Amino acid sequence: MIQDIYNAVIEMEQERVEELVKQEIDAGAGISKILNEGLIAAMDEVGQRFADGEFFVPEMLQAAHAMKAGLDVLRPYMSQGESGNKGTIVIGTVKGDLHDIGKNLVAMMLEGAGFGVIDLGVDVDTDQFLAAAAENKADIVGMSALLTTTMPGMEALIKAIRERGLAYKTMVGGAPVTPAYARKIGADGYGEDAPGAVETARRLLNA
Amino acid sequence: MDFCNFLTRKEIEQVHESSLEILEDVGILVRNKRARDIFFKGGCSVDTDGLVVLPRRIVEECRQSYQPTYTFTARDPKYDRTIPGDRPIIVTGSSAPNIIDPITGEERRATSADIANIAYLINELPGFDVFSISTLADDAPQGQFSLSRFYPALKNCLKPVRSNTPTIQDLEQVLELGAVIAGSPEAYRERPFINHHYCPVVSPLTMDVESTESVIYLTEKGLPVYGTIVPNAGMTSPMSLMGTLALGNAEFLALSTLIQLIRPGAPMIYAVLSTVADMRSGNYAPGAIETGILQMAHTEMARYYNVPSGGYIGLTNAHSNDAQSGYETGMNTTAALLAGADLFNMGGLLSTLMAFDFAKATIDSEIALMLKRIRRGLEFSEENLCLDLIAKVGPGGSYMDEKHTMKNMRTAAILPKIATREMRGRWEEEGRPDAHARALKEAGRILSKENPARFPAELDERVRAHFPGLVAGDARWY
């Protein structure tokens, strides 16, 4: 039952999620239904419980791992239309900055919400962001920074995107980044935390 | 004063053992090529991904040259401070991007003009020993990022100045400023009054490129530099105080090994900002009491290694000068003091490391005086027992008009400017000012006067001629 998959994600039971997804596929359930009602909906609930202070960060992560495991079982069966890819996001920590924990959490939550995420890691410069965005036909480019001294990399990338007339939407986040700063550098969106980033991504892509 | 100890000698040795094991069995990922070469030449193994494994023999050999003292140099020698002798030395918190505007009360980006005012304030506040440049300068002209911070700092403060730089170019520019102020590079080398600090280690067990480069550069030149180790339990270290201690301690040993391999005998400080993340949200929580406990434990390890210790202790998560700000700063610093920490990077910041506040700095100066008073302690002596006086005044007498009382009344106890001792009625008449209001008023009172520590005109002209386009850097109150 789809509901069992949903529950297993919330209960962070990775192996059970994998088993149940396989069972549902074998039973002939709709692939999109499994994806949207079993997996993505569960992650939405996880995000809500996190926002309510009921789920702590490690629980959110474990649930995301369980969801991803289920998604991996489902993926070979997904057709183009059913890819469930709500959008493609290229994400990375800007040049000169090696801090990635927040960014990793955001990447996991975005995947949990059904986005295709290409995580470029840390110390990523403008050219690398642009190359990856082009190669993966990104919808959104997401940038993270912890050091105030590396933040200018965000502005540089947004400027490059604008100057080349590229259509990517941009999102920024990280400890020293504020909504005011995001506006100042012309970012399309700001993520205060991981669930906030998911909301922003959804808003930007009307997903 | 006997220091507070959590760990037995055996437990300390086991932590040391564990750190050696971590360095030997797990290793440290070193992203800076020069650092990898130094470790390799020093006898460590380096693989193609940059993973450095430190054999315990190398770590122990380098321990032999650890120095027991560290000196912060000022332009004027009377402001030099050496630890552990001068403990506790109080250093302001550094590099916040924002400031709470003293007039509007709103948070905004900080500027070089703010740094000038802050430098002057710290020069005047008695609790502070070292001025670590509290904020960044949003108005820095292109190519003068660090210059726009160090110039107003040095121009307005005679106490030792400390901070970091993001690149070697910036670092060289700052050293050039030092040379111009001193009169020549040689004169500057005699008394290098810019004190450097970096966080080259990114937990867990990784060394970065830029900060590591700066540490290498300065150590090679024999200029003063130390690093702070920053594991964050639950995120970048185990969700356990002991695990975080072992990991952070390993990172200290790795950094120290690098420094000692470059220059045996280079002075260092075992400095940490070892914390536990709030796992409900992942938020950074240096105001937590666990920061204090970890500082105490790292200080015990520092004592075992016979190096000075301290770090960022006394930060608060509070966004205003409320009770949370008071108890977080107060409790954590007291715990660290009682454990024997020498250096306290506290002072002036709200919202962890994000914003400088003039009233917070003024309150922190008073907390600093209270910490120093604890260190001063009872001053045991026959004379201080006052037996003759007690006999003289006798039962039912008064000490109020005794010569001894008059002689000691200004020094026996702190006479705080911010803490109120008034009766409630008087306080109500004054409009019920809280600590924040009183502190801000005191900061304003200090900063409304001309700065006596300001560069002499001739020196300032020389500096400004050398660096065209330099920010004004003048302390000017509202």
Image: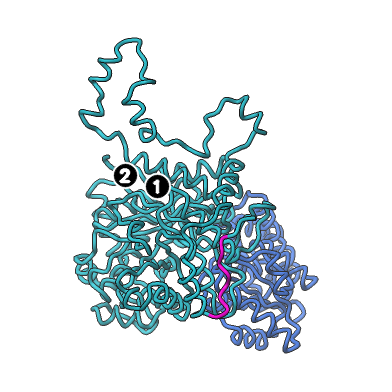
Chain colours: A blue, B cyan
The stretch drawn in magenta includes residue B47 = no
Q: Which residue is mark 1?
A: B293
Q: Residues within 10 Å of mark 2 (few under 14, many from 20)?
A: few
Picture coordinates of residue B275, whole percent (x, y): 45, 54
First of labels 1, 2 by sequence position: 2
In-image side of B177 versus A177 (left or right): left
Q: Quick check: A107 above or below B125?
A: below
Q: Which residue is mark 2?
A: B6
- Looking at the image, which residue sits at the far front? B458
Residue situated in front as seen by the camera: B253 or A138: B253
At a point 54% along the width and 33% down the height, the residue shown is B420
The answer to whether mark 1 and mark 2 are in CB contact below 8 A is: yes
Disc 1, SS = helix
Q: Chain of mark 1?
A: B
**What is the span of residues highlighted in magenta in the rendered image?**
B468-475
At a point 52% along the width and 36% down the height, the residue shown is B419
The stretch drawn in magenta includes residue B473 = yes
Residue type pointed to by label 1: Ile
Picture coordinates of residue B150, whole percent (x, y): 48, 69
Q: Chain of mark 2?
A: B
At a point 65% along the width and 74% down the height, the residue shown is A142
What secondary structure predominates along the stretch shown in magenta?
loop
Residue A22 can be seen, yes or no = no
- Looking at the image, which residue sits at the far right? A206
Picture coordinates of residue B459, whole percent (x, y): 45, 71
State the image quarter where residue A32 is shown.
bottom right
Picture coordinates of residue B455, whole percent (x, y): 47, 65
